[in-house]
Amino acid sequence: MTKRNATLPDRQPDGASDRRWVVIGEDGRYVTLGRAVDPTEDEVRDVERQLAAQGLGGWLAVMSCSPYGPVMPSLMMVRPLASPSRTWDAAEQACRALITSQRTAA
């Protein structure tokens, strides 16, 4: 994965650079794979094997900005990992709900 996705800006409106690769699970939980460079195909395959070993599915995605900032990040699905049983839309909604709940709890 050496190509950057041209549809998401590297710079946010406030000038912060915080585009990140994430894995979003079916239940909305997410983990950052990297920010400075794109993940390698080997790294993505390894994550997919780990998800499958736990009986989980998910998606490789790009998050537009920090989930801890004042703006809700945009999420763009890149591809499914480990044959998720739910839809991307359901996982995306669950991820946004999780981010919102973490913000209100802080």
Image: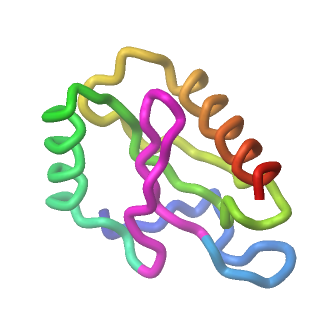
72 to the left or right of 40: right
Q: Is residue 85 magenta?
A: no
Instruction: Pick the residue in front: 5 or 26.
Output: 26
Instruction: Pick the residue in front: 26 or 65.
Output: 26
Q: Tell me which residue sits at (24%, 31%) in the image.
A: 82
77 to the left or right of 96: left
Quarter of the image that includes the C terminus? bottom right
Quarter of the image that includes the N terminus? bottom left
Q: Is residue 35 magenta?
A: yes
Instruction: Pick the residue in front: 65 or 2.
Output: 65
Q: Work out which residue is located at the far front of the displayed protein and give it.
A: 105
- Which corner quadrant of the image does residue 26 belong to? top left
Residue 50 at x, y percent in the picture = 18, 44
Q: Work out which residue is located at the far top of the displayed protein and give it.
A: 85
Residue 12 at x, y percent in the picture = 77, 73
Residue 76 at x, y percent in the picture = 58, 45
Please say if 81 is above or below 76. above
Please say if 6 is above or below 24. below
Exactly how many numbered labels are in the figure? 0
Identify the image's colour scheme: rainbow, by chain, secondary structure or one colour. Answer: rainbow
Region of the chain picked out in magenta, as a range: 19-36
Residue 101 at x, y percent in the picture = 73, 42
- Which corner quadrant of the image does residue 103 belong to? bottom right
Q: Main secondary structure of the magenta part?
A: strand
97 to the left or right of 30: right
Please say if 60 is above or below 73. above
Q: Tell me which residue sits at (53%, 35%) in the image.
A: 28
